[in-house]
Every structure is written in C-alpha cells, then in structure tokens.
Amino acid sequence: MYRTKTCGELRASDVNQLVTLAGWVQKTRKMGGMAFVDLRDRYGVTQLVFNQDVDASLCERANKLGREYVVQATGTVKERSNKNLHIPTGEIELIVSELTILNAAATPPFTIEDETDGGDDLRMKYRYLDLRRNVVRSNLELRHKMTIEVRRYMDSQQFIEVETPVLVSSTPEGARDFVVPSRMNPGQFYALPQSPQTLKQLLMVSGFDRYFQIVKCFRDEDLRADRQPEFTQIDCEMSFVEQDDILTMFEGLSKYLFKTIRGVEINEPFRRISWNDAMKYYGSDKPDLRFDMRFVELDDVLKGHGFSVFDNAAYVGGICAKGAASYTRKQLDALTDFVKRPQIGAKGMVYARVEEDGIKSSVDKFYTQETLQEMKKAFGAEPGDLILILSGDDVTKTRKQLCELRLEMGSQLGLRDKNKFVCLWVVDFPLLEWSEEDRRYYAMHHPFTSPKPEDIHLLDSNPGDVRANAYDMVVNGVEVGGGSIRIHDNELQQKMFRLLGFAAEQAEAQFGFLMNAFKYGAPPHGGIAYGLDRWVSLFAGLDSIRDCIAFPKNNSGRDVMLDAPSAIAQAQLDELRIAVNIPPVC
Ligand code: ASP
C-alpha cells in the first residue's frame, strides 16, 4: 500500500497512530536540528517532521528534498505544539521514521501556490503543474459536482442522456464550422457540431420525449474571456411543451443547482423581461440586474433647448447613480474617457449632480433649472445622486454605450457583488436579424426556432417584426443558457429557410433529413442549452471560463501545451488527398 491516509485527513483524534502518506513536497524548512516538510496531495497538506537527534541521516535526506519531489513517508501522528489553525491538519504533524523518494522532480517553472509567480502563458504550457494548485483544482472539483447534480436532477425528471456523434455535417448556430477531412471519402469533410441541435430534434421525432446530454460543441469564432473553440453544453430537449413548460422545468434545474452547489436558496420565480425592454432599459440582451439603474430616455425633456449635440441626436438617455453626486471632477473626466474609448465609442458624456440647492450640470448654460428639475423627476432622482447622459445618432449603438457606462458605474459603486445572484429570463426575441452588410436576414437564435404563432402572419410582409418563441437565461449579466420552441412543421421550416436566403436545393441538401423527418409525425417540441463552462465560472466567481477547463486553449485557439494545431506530415496529407497551398505558420 502506498499510503494509509491522505495528506488532508489527519486530525488531533489520530494522535499516536502509525500512518503512511504519499504526495508532493510543497516546501521544506530547516530549523535548528529539525527539518519540516509540507507534503501535499489533492486532499490537503500535512507537516512532516524529521529530528536530527533521532535519525541524522533521515533528517539529512529530508533537507535535500526538492520542491515537487514525490515521496512516501511513514511515521507517528503527534499533536503540534505550534498549531496552525488555518489548515484542517494544522493541529498535528507526522514524526517520520521512514522516507522513500518515489520520484525526483525538476524545479517547476513557477511556484505551485495559490498565489503563483507564473504568468498565463507559462501556466498554460505547464498546465499539468498549474492543475496542482488548489485554486485551479477546486474549480474542476466544482465542475465535477455540477455535472453530477445536473445528471441527478435530469434523471429525476425522466430525461435520458443520449450521446450524439461528433463527426457530423454543418449544424448552423451562427459560427464557422470546424471541419475534418474524410480519408474514406476523398474531398469530403465532416463538420464538428456547433451543437447537437438537429440531432436532438430528431430524437424528439423518435419519441424520446425528454433528452439531455453534457456535450462538447465546437465553434470556430473569435475568442474572448468567455469563449473557447470547444466548450461544453448541458443540452436539453422536450416534447409536447410550450415555452412556459420549458422555463418552469429549467428554472427548477437552476434553483436546484444554486442550492446544491452554492447553498443559495431562490424561492421567488425568475423575473421575465422582454428583449425589447431589456434593450430599452439596459441596452443589452443580457442585463445585469443585481442593480437597477435603468435607462431613462430624455429626448422629450432635453431636446429643443439649443444644445445642438442633443438636438441633433437620434437618442438622448441616461442613468442615475444613487449617491454618486460626490464624484469629483477628476472621476467624471475619467468616466468621460471611459465612454470615449474606441471599444465603446461615445463622443462625450454629460453629467448632472443633484444637490440640495439645485442641479449642477456640465451643460448648465443650455438648460434652465426648471428643465433640469424635470429631468430629475424623470429619473426619480434625489439630492446626492449623479445623472450621466449619453447621446448619439444611432439608437442601438448609443444604448450599448450607455450599457457599458451603467456596468462601469455598477462596478465602481460596488453593486456587482460576485456572491449575489440575480437570474432572469429574457423572452420574446426577434426571430430575425437584418445584416446591412450582407443585405439579408439571419436567424437570431437558429433557423429551427419557431415564430410566435400570433406573429406568423408578418413573416411575408414584415419579417423583421416577427418575434420568436425563444428565451435566454441570464445570471448577473451572463447568458448562461438559451433555447426555443422549434418549428415542427415541414412547410413552415421550408419557409424559414427561404427567408434566410437558402435556395430550395441548398436547404434540401443541408437539412433535407430534418424536413423529411418532420413528414413522419414530429411532436411539438422545444429545448434549451446551458453553457456549462460559463455556469461553473459564475459559481466559482471566475473572470474567465478558461479557469474551469482542465486543458483550455489560448485566445488564438492554440493549446500551447500540446502545441496544437500543428502541421501534419505530407504522407498524411497525401492520404487525405489534401494540398496545402500556404506555408505552415510556425
Ligand atoms: N442549440 C442551441 C444553442 O446551442 C440551444 C437550443 O436552442 O437548444 O444555442
């Protein structure tokens, strides 16, 4: 037996026991005639003690142990005179009588500590060492617990986990496909699934009724902190349901996860907000509602008073930051710089401090106190509040800028507490999105999403106004999941493809299998998919989903540890009958 106990297990009640531990050397310290070694495994750290007076050569060997050596130590558990109450094993230590080096270790390129000196790139290159750190490991433990609880809940609700293939054909979710050449079918390619969307719909046609899968999905798109080229979904589909049934079922899953994973009890139903209102009041389809600070439109109040910036704008609107009237000129200038950053793109910002004796604004000379009071009323502002206003000639863009300002103010005022969770459903999304650049409509969710029955008549006359039976679940400004009720009617599905600019043959070639299946008795159905990585990182309070993925890719889509992607041998290319016409990028 390599060990009889783990390094996180021993307590004062184990004193005088003879035990064997195995693990990695975290640290060695020499003090007088004693050597102390912190031995670490996944479960914790135990202090090993070597006494020169008892066994000089053993103590000498302990002093020579390097960081991250793998060792086995047998000894007797003793109560510590100098207790460390910060760690669970801090009341005891192991007086070692036998020490075996199981494996030596090269000096690690960064310290294996909670606060490491290793930069991002280095930690990713040596990810297996990074994973030894408590902070990273505990994220993966949380992830594991979460998948177990998801399976438990889904099973309790009669969902069946079904695996779907990874080598498929294109599954349009709005990103580029990753493709895999087929050796047996030269010149032809599989696409990796952007999601199992069409397959789960087929499972409904097969009568599975309730499906789920914790599944890898692949999307070739530009990466950000919350995106990876391969990511994991909790993918679900149900038959004979309407939107409300889905929202209720998955509100149940969400509350269950909050309770079992975070110990947070949510009793009230999730708020539901229409996409239109989300955009109007928060400038985002994933508003962070841990704080309100909703937008107030000021066109009626502030236009027509000779301030040309507002007079000529298509949108004038602002937010009221409670209690922030004490912001200094310097802080306000910094906020102006913030909104003017190229990523945000506002031209400027107007502010008004609401004080006991009136309103002091940066555009005082254009407005009378009466107009400013009217504005104050529109916000319901009180003395001590700070009003911040943006304007612009594009309503959507200006709202997005105001959204950034709102989030920034929320952060500055401490209103975005990572331990507070506010969940909501955003509903009534538009079915289609017009692309000026491509002069065509795109599906806002995906082409299989059903229009609201009451809007179907608009499909021909005014497709842009058609709302979808689609919904997103948003937690603290993060879209954790989204789904829709599907089209289950062959004719309507064909019409949708036409609207999206697919020629009949093209739609047939790409999605004939689905439309054909719909001819054989497709039940009404709908579903949702959650981003597991996003959800775990939210629960773990992480800023990036990378930290809860064992072997993530960097922002250029590279695995720097495996050095993938990489060039392949000419023989392999020949076998696939592929000619690469650019020199490999090194
Ligand atoms: N397949 C969708 C997605 O990946 C989710 C769904 O509609 O169920 O976003």
Image: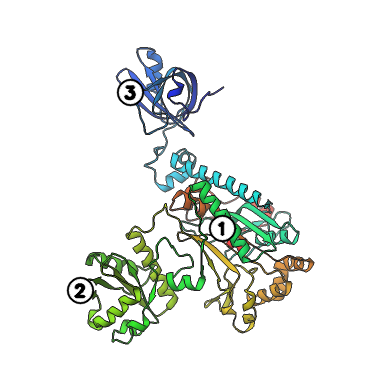
Of all residues shown, which one is farthest toward the right? 520
Amino acid type, mark 1: Glu
Locate the N terminus by quadrant: top right
Which corner quadrant of the image does residue 369 belong to? bottom left
Residue 565 in view here: no
Q: Position of residue 306 (x, y in %)?
A: 28, 87
Alpha-carbon distance for marks 1 and 3? Answer: 56 Å
Q: Position of residue 164 (x, y in %)?
A: 68, 54
Sequence-wise, which precedes: disc 2 or disc 1?
A: 1
Which corner quadrant of the image does residue 201 belong to? bottom right
Alpha-carbon distance for marks 2 and 3? Answer: 68 Å
Q: Is residue 220 left or right of residue 342?
A: right
Above or below: residue 459 compared with residue 418: below
- Where does label 1 land, which residue? 251
- Where does label 3 land, which residue? 30
Query: For this rendering, which residue is in front, 467 or 36?
Result: 467
Sequence-wise, which precedes: disc 1 or disc 3?
A: 3
Residue 353 in view here: yes
Question: Label for residue 357?
Answer: 2
Sequence-wise, which precedes: disc 2 or disc 3?
A: 3
Question: Label for residue 545?
Answer: none
Question: Which quadrant of the picture is home to ligand 1?
Answer: bottom right
Of all residues shown, which one is farthest toward the front? 267
At x 47% / y 55%, what residue is drawn? 555
Task: Give SS at disc 1.
Answer: helix
Q: Nearer the viewer, mark 1 or mark 3?
A: 1
Q: Is residue 32 left or right of residue 187?
A: left
Amino acid type, mark 2: Asp
